[in-house]
Image (tube, rainbow, N blue to C red):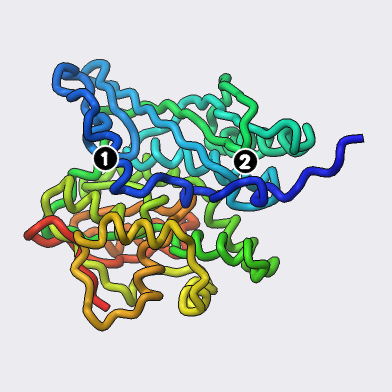
Amino acid sequence: MKSMSPRLTSLAHGGGCGCKLAPAVLRDLLAGMPQMAPFSQLLVGSDKADDAAVWQIDDNTCIIATTDFFMPVVDDPRDFGRIAATNAISDIYAMGAKPILALAIVGMPIDKLESATIRAILAGGAETCANAGIPVAGGHSIDSQEPIYGLAVIGLCHPSRLRTNAMAKPTNSVILTKALGVGIYSAAIKQGLIDGESYAEMIASTTMLNRVGSELSANSDVHALTDVTGFGLLGHALEVARASEVAIEVDVARVPLLTHALEWAKQGIVTGASKRNWASYGAGVAWPGDAPDWLRHLLTDPQTSGGLLVTCAPGAAEGLVGELHAKGYASAAVIGRVVAGEPQVRIAA
């Protein structure tokens, strides 16, 4: 008789979006990629450091395409599937589009995991896709040493509703729609520190679809959109700053956090990805000299299935936050502003 499946996280050297290659490594690997210029209909490609690729078919339709997958961030197989699917679909919403279908990406150590465990992962992903109103229309699977699951997702939008990370404008307000701390919580899981209530808080955040992105794109006051995932708040804010050629100021006191994120960060319960993130892009952050290390760990914490980072006309910010709260994004808050200047992130501690 086959033995019971081991803990999913015990089979992976990393988990969730903390598995992503460090930004500096990724830039080095992509440096030799062919230029996108010959493809005039490719509005967003790998050279843009954005959430998804965009191909314009005609005056009314853009195809949005993305793929995202990772190793387990939790041990419950259904939750792993739900989180991975939510995270992958988020790339479509972060471009202001609506998803239409997904393909599953599956790599499993079939000699170590029971079939029921793998089926639960797939079922969790399918459940999330159903909640998003799309089918899992196919996919591909391999036998791998570590468990891997995710989706390739296709979406559509009108060109006028496309939102990229290059659209931020000076004077814009900056909104974050979910609380930070998912990476810290995942580190706490591995150290056996997380309780049922904290786990439920983490799952509620990471399985909440960012579908509001496709609604925000209908609002002309909303300019840039991106989602906050493996590079942390600072990394993704810096991508917006560089793409838009602006500076972004972050008011640390206004950044929403999961309940125990601050406490655990102060105790040094952080991921290795947080440190890799800072090593990759810290030079692009204007950092107060007296700011503590735990604050840096919070702001570089890799978010698995994190929230949207939104820039908007300043007069619309509070109204948008109210709308976000009404739609269930209870942690949404204005966390800063966009200003003219050298592309960087500036921290107000």
The quadrant in which the N terminus is found is top right
**For residue 185, above or below residue 91:** below
Q: Which residue is mark 2?
A: 81
Left or right position of 164 against 131: left
Left or right position of 236 against 147: left
**For residue 81, above or below residue 344:** above
Q: Residue at x 44, y 63 (%)?
A: 180
> How many numbered discs?
2
The percent position of residue 135, horizontal first and vertical second, equals 57, 25
The quadrant in which the C terminus is found is bottom left
Which residue is at the far bottom? 290
Quarter of the view holding residue 335: bottom left
The percent position of residue 310, horizontal first and vertical second, equals 29, 53
Q: Amino acid at mark 2?
A: Gly
Q: Disc 1 on helix, strand or loop?
A: helix
Q: How many residues crowd mark 2 within 10 Å: few (<14), some (14–19), many (20+)?
A: many
Q: Which residue is mark 1?
A: 28
Q: Is residue 339 visible?
A: yes
